Amino acid sequence: MRALFERSLGAAGLHLAEGWKVWEAYREFEQAVLLTIAEDNIETKSKQVDIVRSIFRRQLTVPLANHADTLRDYREWEEQQGTKVGDEADELAGLPPNVVSSYAKAMKVCSKYKPIEELIASGKAGDAELLHNYQLYIGLEEDTGDPARVQVIYERAIADFPITSELWLKYTEYLDSNLKVPSIIKTVYARAVQNCPWVGELWKRYLLALERCGAQENEIFPVYEKSLQSGLQTPTEYLDLFLTRADSLRRMLKSESNETEKQADLKQLWETFDHASQFLTTYFPDYVDRSLQLYRYWARLAVHLGNDVMAARGVWENLIKSSGWMTEVWKGYISMELELRNIKEARSIYRRCYSRKFEANGAELMCDEWLRFEREYGSLEDYDRAVLKVRPRLAEVKAMQLAQEVKGGAVHSSGVTTQAAATAVERPKGRESLQKERDQVVTSNKRKRGLGHKDYDALSKRQKSTKRSTKETIIVNQEKDPNQQEKVDTEMKADKSMSRIGHQSEDSKSSTSKQQVYTDRCTAFVSNIPFEVTEEQLHEFFSSSGGLKDVRMLRDRYTGRPRGIAYIEFESEDFLSAAIQKNRQKLFGRPISVAQSNPDMGRSKPTHGATARHGRGGGSRPTDERTEKLEILHDKLDQPRGGSVMVGHRRGGHVKLTGSNTFAVPRRLVKPLGWGASEQRPAEAGEEAPKSNEEFRKLLLQS
């Protein structure tokens, strides 16, 4: 019974408002034992008197609410035993000096905590205010440096707020760093994960606490299995659990001396990594870990613990199959090979990845990385070979970036926004869809039509159909009536005037739907922006330059993903010059490129007889922005700007021939490489005239 009372004192005896009840019950028990001892058993009775006196004095040194009553009861009990304690001048006279000093400290603590105790005990405060009061109380107790009293306050707070995860996190952190009693720590963590199983940090700390307390594998593994079934909400929490488990197994391997058990632990470590990879892929297929913590760790341990380089390479190869569009994967693979001084293997990886399709400017980064690698590790011949490989790839990448910029600028100017633009970074599209989009952008110089073009298309189609039917009718009837030509001219002029009127009306309609016109006169063009950067963060980065008016971040027209480029508009040239000074400065660890936007580039001279088309709705900009940038693209690729070869078709109209579609060109139009568009193909001696369809049909029937 005495041991039970001692345990109760440790659990509740320090409760400032209610702890005196436990002390009083303990004293009453010991006094009852004293009464049962016979008077002639002097030695036993004397020992029991000392026990009761010790309980009184211990209670006087503990900050409790009824200290005055306890002192009065003690003086009365001592008088019954024939001992005088206290007098009119000093109520503590006759007590040992240590008890007197401890009693004085306890009284000061009681006066210090009394206001908070009254607030907590009143029961009038709401949950938020009550929790705040408990946190203040805990802070005061932590300042005193008494772990036992701090534990009591935490237990009181948790009794009122059992599912408040913040309390459990602070409580367990305090126990780990201050109390360090294995039995108490294990019990508290078991209660914490039982009340808040959705908190991954508690499970992680629980596993670490078990390892600190020297728990065996048969005690740690069930907790780990239970944590994976606790219903955590985010993939990062599960990743932390897997990494914590891998850390524990790695430490076990280093301390293991038995080779058989060491191999068993190593196998269990590989199974943990494999389970982690499959678990995250199955339950969080869209999760992207840019840091690659799991796979870097896995490959490094395979090399240094398992002495198996092929297994480490297998880790990276499997990751390339699922996430080869990330530059971080290839960089991690190459970094491992360089760490092992495998220069040839690293070079082969660069040769594999430089032509891959990456998000944003990843291909450009990998090309630059390859050249840097050859400068630092390769010979001059290796560097020259790399340059020959990289140079055309960089030209291709720059062309695609310019095309994406053109398409992104058109989407931005139309005022279209999507919900996907505000979400986190997503996986890029597949190879076929990306190539299809790029081909459409490069081979077409048409602007994206706005809201007012649907009716205009129908009108223009009707007008074209009317023109054709009118022409055909007049050609047939021209033989009958020679004066019909004058009527034809009149009707054609009327059609043209109506077409112009319809076009102008539609332009005026689309101008009303246009939201904003950008002149880009004091604008900086920013590229190589990390994908996780938002407009607000970009605004904050350039706000130090001053005079910032607008931030326009270009996004993918289908997915809403950032493209890594943006336009930053400033109030004057001075502010723009200050912003350009930030060129090559790092934003989220990546150097960004800042240059002045030049809206006049490529718009001065219309090519091949084509007039400069105005922007949507006839705005203030004199040329189409996409036409300007496509002209720049043609200049970079050394291609003529005037469009593709137009070949007449027997059904009317023309066929545009682009790219490698030379199979559709009549033989008389085919020219050797190097012949310009204006140069005529010389006639060949004895050249046969092209045959008609009827002549081909007769030849087939004869054969």
Image (spheres, rainbow, N blue to C red):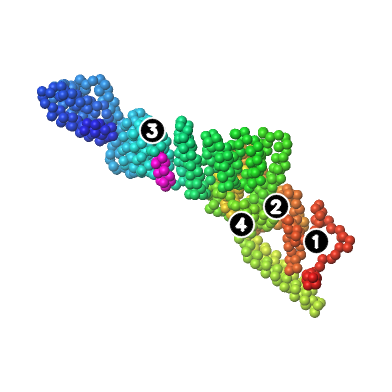
Residue type, numbered disc 3: Cys
State the image quarter where residue 43 is shown: top left
Residue annotated with mark 4: 514
The quadrant in which the N terminus is found is: top left
Does label 4 or label 3 sit earlier along the sequence?
3
Q: Is residue 455 above or below residue 207?
A: below
Which circle marks residue 667 in the picture? 1
Residues in magenta, as a range = 220-232
Q: Which element carries disc 3, helix, strand or loop?
A: loop
Q: Which element carries disc 4, helix, strand or loop?
A: loop
- The answer to whether residue 686 is left or right of residue 318 is right
Residue annotated with mark 3: 213
Whole-percent x and y of residue 388? 72, 42
**Dot 2, how many residues are within 10 Å of its Cα: few (below 14), some (14-19), or many (20+)?**
many
Does label 1 or label 3 sit earlier along the sequence?
3
> Which residue sits at x=34%, y=37%?
187
Label 1 to label 3: alpha-carbon separation: 87 Å
Residue annotated with mark 2: 630
Membership of 477 in magenta stretch: no
Residue type, numbered disc 1: Arg
Membership of 227 in magenta stretch: yes
Q: Nearer the viewer, residue 8 or 150?
A: 8
Q: Nearer the viewer, mark 1 or mark 2?
A: 1
Does label 1 or label 4 sit earlier along the sequence?
4
